[in-house]
Amino acid sequence: MLFTEPRFLAFFALAFAVHWGLRSDVWRKRWLLVCSYVFYGAWDWRFLFLILGSTVIDYVAARRLERARDGGRPTRPWLVLSLVANLGILGFFKYCNFFATSGAALLSWLGLPVGDVTLQIVLPVGISFFTFQTMSYSIDVYRGHLRAERNFWDFALFVGFFPQLVAGPIVRAIDFLPQLAQSKRWRAVRFQPALWLFLIGFIKKACIADGIAPTVDAVYGDPAAYNAASMWIATAFYAIQIYCDFSGYSDMAIACARLFGYELRLNFNHPYFARDITDFWRRWHISLSGWLRDYLYIPLGGNRGSRLFTHRNLMLTMLLGGLWHGAGWNFVVWGALHGTALVLHKEWMRWRGANAARVPFLSQLSMLAVVLTAWIFFRATSFSDAFLIVRGCWTWNAPGTEAVDPRLALLLLPLALAHAMAAWPTALRHLQRVPAPVATLGLGALTAMALLFVPIADRPFIYFQF
Amino acid sequence: MTTRTNPRADARPLALQALGHVLCFGVGLLGVSRLIHDYDWRGLYSDVTLEKVQHLIESDEQYDTLFVGSSRMYAGVIPATFDAEMADQGLPTHSFNAADCAMGMHEANALLRDLCERMPNPPKRVVVELHWWDPVFRAENHRTTRAVGWHSLGETLSVLRSIALPIDAQDPAPDFAGKITLVQDHLRCLVGNLFRVGQGVRILKQLWSPSPSTNGVYPEELERGYCELGKTNRWGRRARNRFVSPEGQAEYADLVETAKHWDRSQKGFNIAAFKRQADYLQSRGIDLIYMVAPTVESKPGYGDLEIIRRRVPVLVYDQPLDVPEYFATENRFDTRHLNRSGGVSFSRRLAADCAREWGNTARTGSRPDQPSAR
């Protein structure tokens, strides 16, 4: 069930109406849990057992861990149990075939050919998100940052809360569990800003990302047929597509959560307007980069050591971050490119000191160059295609002659509008002063205009596969 | 002293407020959609239909008779021949063939309503090719903008009713799951039409360069909407080649034999849709005739025709035993369509039968077992 599908609208309307129709907060939470499981089960009901299993393991492990600490017994085994279970689930479903095929390729290269080693495994939707969520919970309880949740149903809702279940943002228990303890009041919810946010997310995903996807698919499907300008256009379009697809989903998820009275953290903050590559990672997929920082980079030692040690930690974090996105070497290369750029940027900052930010335009341009080049590896279907496009873009030497229509850039107008609205605080303040009925009328009018640009065919969110 | 609050009383203004917002949202949504719809009314017609519609609206010629239907009508009725025969019969007409390939009853109905609204001088008489009110999308039309185009609210409700009826004419008839899929597809088309979903880029292009994107077949190549297959039309040559081949001829002979023995008792017409169409046209003073085209590939069935005949004359020409001349190879372009000589002959016959029906005050219509003779 996609947020952009009509059946989601019906599902959400029912969930919303019953939620606010119930008097008791306890029943509201139970109802949201039922809705979340129905939402997840709509993909494949068999994976409900997986999410339930993950929930039970982490609930029990955290409770036992806390009890062990209170009793003065070792707590680490319970943390290890939680991590092994979560990483085991993730490893089996997401990386099993990747490691098997990579191992087989290595053996074959060494002259020891093996047969087909892949298993028929279906990747459960959103597995990377909910396993990271539950791991962060166990780690926070282990570190003593958080008390273990006593109410199993509340914990299950934290893991399965449907707005963010399948494609984030990755919610921290420390942010979400306290919200479950608060009473939800209809009057406290600001519906109109939430609906506007949902509409903006919808426009990003359905109008922009899905609208430009066919152009990207055409060029990346057969890059040898296209000229260099088309490769640039397709790569820029992909950068916009993946941003609009993912941040659009995040906006809709945050908006849906708000309509139920819950707050989720911001996941994107205009990343392509970042000053440099380090700033880019403060603005892109904030919930993942924060997770990697707090639960991987800092435990590895962070920057509390020599420069080489810091760079190693940075590279490892980015490589694993790349691998988190998908079980493929292209994602590892994507992570490596970003890791290298971050290391070089750190060195540049150290070398230039206060003068480093003298030319912000050049800094932004180099950030965009790195990000776009890295997206080529992220999107291309093979390394040979990726290198072909990189060569075509950077040497203006592409083998093909076909060209995409440059007028397609018109499709970016709605994005510019949405971006300008979001980035212009005065406009938002003006918008808040508009009488509520007029704003609602405008919401309806903008929805009608957005529908004009929704492609007829449904296209799943890119980040569902991660 | 404590004040007691009644939660129900608290909830009432909130509910009214929410309702008010829903209404405002609806007004904004539907209002803008309506404006876009009105601006883009041409948007979802096929190229050929659009050219015909534009001609009918903009031309100074005052057509009083229209033919609406599928390619069998498009390639079977020659307006000039029809008018000449009508004049001979003492009922002069000035007709136009508004049919288009693969146009079913629902699309034809939507087209007729649009023409009645937009033509400066609406027609006085209409001949509609009779089919089932077929709820199954034709393969070539499925999920095209053209299929979306006729899905007004009324037409969608009508097609949903057709789905609820037994769909005998389909082979194989859709099962329950198939019907659910059909319902979803039609609802999707309704939403697509109401809100012009996905049409933004095309509309922007039109704003950018307002010249209509048509295929240029009208009016130079067409004779008041008639299309001679093989001469002006780009499609159909493969069917023609197949038809004239020895295997094609044997196949056609088999089809004609089968048609002679069709089961004429099939029921399941969407009678309500016929009544709605008849009511609409008659309320505008338009005389309506239904015509079953001479073809061996349609199975309209006759179980319910008597009910239709009580309201509207029905002329039936799909029985090879009754009208063998239209099934003779020399009068056919292929198994489905007449060629020009067949079209000339058929247009005369149709004119004579229409003149009789329109000339009669009591409309009885011809019977399938007793085709009207000149």
Image (cartoon, grey):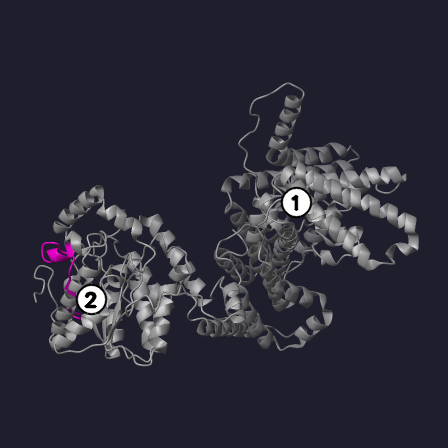
Q: Quadrant of the C terminus of chain B?
A: bottom left
Three-letter residue code for mark 2: Tyr
Q: CA distance from mark 1 to mark 2?
A: 61 Å
Q: Which residues are magenta?
A: B310-327
Q: What's the chain of the residue with tag 1?
A: A
Q: Residues within 10 Å of mark 2 (few under 14, many from 20)?
A: many
**Residue receiving disc 1:** A389
Instruction: Identify which residue is drawn at 20% across, 66% down.
Output: B290
Specify whether B206 is left or right of B151: right
For residue B299, above or below residue A433: above
For residue A70, above or below residue A271: above
For residue A57, above or below residue B151: above
**Residue receiving disc 2:** B290
- Magenta stretch: dominant SS? loop
Specify whether B300 is left or right of B184: left
**A209 vs B11, nearest the viewer:** A209
| Tag 1 secondary structure | helix
